[in-house]
Amino acid sequence: MFFDRTRKLWHSLAFRLTLWYALVFVLLAMTAFALFYLLIVRVIDQRTDEDLLTNANRLGQIYNLEGSEMLQRAALLQVQSVGEHKMFFRLFYATGIFYSSSNMAFWKSIGIDRRAVDDLLVKGRTYSYATQPIPDRPFKARVIYRRFGAAIMLQMGYSLEAENRLLQSFQRIFMITMVALLGLAVMVGWFMARRALAGVASVTRTARQISEEDLETRVPVFHQHNEIDQLAVTFNQMLDRIQHLVKGIRQMNDNIAHDLRSPITRIRGLAEVTLGGADLAEYQGMAASTIEECDWLLHMINTMLTISRTEAGLDPKSFRRLDLSALAHDACALFQPLAEDKGIQMQAEAQGGCPVLGDAAMLQRLLANLIDNAIKYTPTGGRVRVGVTCDGESARLEVEDNGTGIATEDHARVFERFFRGDRSRSQEGAGLGLSLALAIARAHGGDISLTSRPEQGSLFTVRLPMEDSRTQ
Ligand code: ADP
């Protein structure tokens, strides 16, 4: 249980973000401290060096004007005025033999820095600096070496105790501030990460709540126009689509059940009647009706399968260069007798030369479904027009009638599977013709639109990309 929680926390984005915040903060703070620390050390060193040089130069002038005796006295006075724990001096010959110094009890046997002396003797410099440890003392001394004349060397040093203490307390203050700020950074980081990820948590909660029964719940959107808001909006849009799809599937299931039940009930009724006793003619009649009903069922099932396959995409190998106008003319010729029987005037307005790349059988089915509907839903004495035009980019097929028309609220639904208008119930049909037509148009990279008004007729417009524009 505990390990589970720890593991969960370790893997959580909020925890990791907090760690990153804290790490970045610590790194930045430490860099700032290091720079500041180096700056302070440099300023202190510079100031000490300047002081030492001023003193050494002053002693140099005294030596030049008044000689070695006065030099010793002046150096001693200098040390006494500053303090024997704070400053010392020693005079020695180039051979390394000391001949004068201040009280060295505090400084013990502080050595001579070889490199600094070499700077004077070998490189010929007048002065040189060194930072040297003081035996048994926890701090160092900053020391200047200066040459007087050819043989006399001055070693004069300042204790760095005060500076050391200053830097130590600076370090301590930094550590305390760091710990406090780190705690604050973790708290602020945790708070900020939780706040930033609160939206994600709300999306997760909503996703958990959603089940097949409850598709209504939506993630709250706070309209702050940030990424989380975008996620919530996209998630809600996805839920809308899922809800719409589930609703469509449920409705389709109901429709399939309903449409399958009627023929099966009829077959059963026939069988029941015939079972009660019948002669050969009645048996034959029952068999013929059963075949008819089964054919109808098979037709429905096959159409459903064709729609699904077409929606999944047609085989590109079945695509050929076709003239849409020729296809339209052929279809009109095929339906002419049916239209004449019903007293409907068929009009084909298709000029030649509208090349499209497509599956001939499928496009014929599309045309047949639209023209069949136009004749079916137009009363005697009506008119059906089939037109094909093309504008270089797309080919336009129009199937227009002046029949019953479609109510505006049904315009989108007529393309749904099994949808049948209330007034179409008297006509034969399964409500699959327009779904298939739309699937075919889309499989060819096109679409179908509808303009219609009740009692005034309908105009179905199919747009297909022209062959030239597809091959480009
Ligand atoms: P079916 O014609 O088998 O009912 P469709 O999918 O072809 O199925 O059409 C769906 C519905 O759209 C029809 O039931 C009808 O209400 C309506 N419809 C289709 N075409 C027309 C049209 N030309 N005029 C009026 N209504 C139409």
Image (tube, helix red, strand yellow):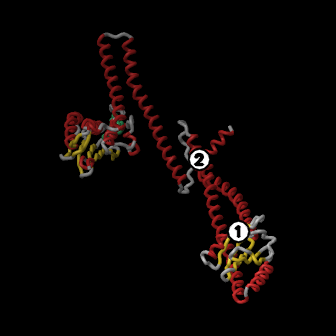
Pointer 2 residue: 202
At which x and y percent is residue 339? 23, 36
100 with respect to 268 (left or right) = right
Q: Are marks 2 and 1 in contact (CB under 8 Å)?
A: no
Q: Quadrant of residue 439?
A: top left
Secondary element at image label 2: helix
At which x and y percent is residue 427? 33, 33
Quote the CA–CA distance across marks 2 and 1. Answer: 65 Å
Decide which of 357, 191 is in the foreground and name it: 191
At which x and y percent is residue 248? 44, 37
Q: Is residue 310 above or below residue 462?
A: above
Q: Residue 132: which disc?
A: 1
Rendered residue at 50%/43% (across/down): 239
Residue 406 visible? The answer is yes
209 with respect to 388 (left or right) = right
Q: Residue furthest bottom?
A: 65
Q: Quadrant location of ligand 1? A: top left
